[in-house]
Amino acid sequence: MTLPIAGLGLTGCSSNTSNRYLEGNFAPVLAESTVISLDTTGVIPDELAGRFVRNGPNPNDDASRSRYHWFVGRGMVHGVRLDAGRAMWYRNRYVASPSGQTPNTSVIGHAGKTLAIVESGGLPVELDYELTSVNDDMKMGGGFSAHPQLDPDTG
């Protein structure tokens, strides 16, 4: 049995110009967009309301194809809003982070805020309900995990 990553260097990228992290489902999304009143197949229960939001790295045009790894790249959030049995919108937005960090790992709700967070313990970026970055200067008193857990004693 041959592993599909055989022959790859520590960067996880092949030596030629193609790169599995920039193709197929991993290909970069080229533009921010908003689509309203989405067509759906099947039925969305009326009780299912709110947003489904995800975050991930999305390289911009300066990505080197031969050296790019899928953990690297500006964060891009994607979201779908459901209400009253309808898909109200889909939108995607780059996470704006002038501080130079790349919150590209996860999205969490914390203290009534929606936060884009990064693997390396950097500070989160707050997102509004429409997924626009509104605060990249969060004062948290230290690093932040991209995979938080609830404390069973304190919540």
Image: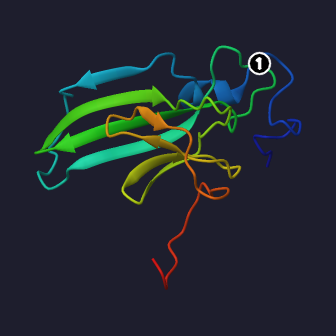
Residue placed furthest toward the bottom: 153
| Residue 14 image-quadrant placement | top right
What amino acid is at disc 1? Ser
Residue 27 rendering spot, x and y as whole percentages? 58, 24
Judge by depth and name the residue closer to the eye, 17 or 49. 49
Judge by depth and name the residue closer to the eye, 70 or 25. 70
Residue 26 rendering spot, x and y as whole percentages? 58, 30
| Residue 61 image-quadrant placement | top right
Indicate whether 16 appears above or below 42. above
Question: Where is mark 1, residue-wise?
Answer: 64
Quadrant of the drawing holding the C terminus: bottom left
Query: Residue visible at 30% across and 45% down?
Result: 51
Is 80 on the left or on the right of 117, as rendered? left
Is 57 on the left or on the right of 4, as rendered? left
Q: How is the image coloured?
A: rainbow
Indicate whether 148 appears above or below 39. below
Query: Residue visible at 66% across and 49% down?
Result: 119
Query: Residue visible at 25% across and 48% down?
Result: 50
Q: How many marks?
A: 1
Judge by depth and name the residue closer to the eye, 78 or 128. 128
CA neighbours of label 1 inside 10 A, class few (<14), some (14 to 19), many (20+): few
Query: Residue visible at 21% across and 43% down?
Result: 82
Residue 54 rendering spot, x and y as whole percentages? 45, 43
Is 46 on the left or on the right of 103, as rendered? left
Q: Could you tell me which secondary element the residue under label 1 belongs to?
A: loop
Judge by depth and name the residue closer to the eye, 21 or 147. 147
